[in-house]
Amino acid sequence: MTSTPLEWFKSSHSSNEGPDCLEVALTPAAVHIRDSKDRDGARLTVADATWTEFLGFAVHDA
């Protein structure tokens, strides 16, 4: 079985100046999240429905 590499990206609201950014990679079944400062470190994977719920909360409270 061949694994497709994840395509990571930062939010368009992130700047290259700031040290605190998350990167995400989308797959059909999940959203993968990592710290842009530690790309080889721990990663969090959540169901896309969970990510959608989180974004609704984050945007509402921003």
Image: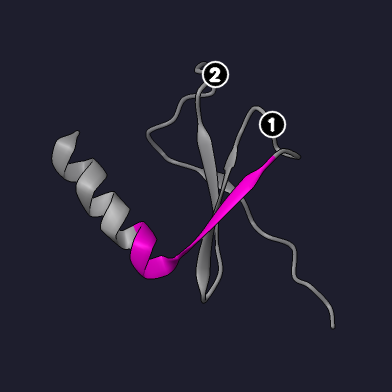
Contact between labelled residues 1 and 2, with CB atoms less than 8 Å apart = no
What's the amino acid at mark 2? Answer: Pro
Residue 24, position in %: x, y? 53, 50
Density class for disc 1 (Cα within 10 Å; few <14, some 14-19, many ≥20) is: few
Quarter of the image for the N terminus: give it: bottom right
* Location of residue 5 with respect to 9 vertically, above or below: below
* Residue where numbered disc 1 is placed: 38
Q: Residue at x 54, y 23 (%)?
A: 16
Q: Is residue 6 left or right of residue 59?
A: right
Q: Residue at x 50, y 23 (%)?
A: 20
Quadrant in the rendering for residue 60? top left
Q: Residue at x 44, y 41 (%)?
A: 11
Highlighted range, magenta:
42-51
What's the amino acid at mark 1? Answer: Asp
Asked which secondary structure carries label 2, the reply is: loop
**In front: label 2 or label 1:** 1
Density class for disc 2 (Cα within 10 Å; few <14, some 14-19, many ≥20) is: few
* Location of residue 49 with respect to 37 vertically, above or below: below
Q: Is residue 62 left or right of residue 10?
A: left
Circle nearer the N terminus (2, 1): 2
Asked which secondary structure carries label 1, the reply is: loop
* Residue where numbered disc 2 is placed: 19
* Location of residue 62 with respect to 59 vertically, above or below: above
Quarter of the image for the C terminus: give it: top left
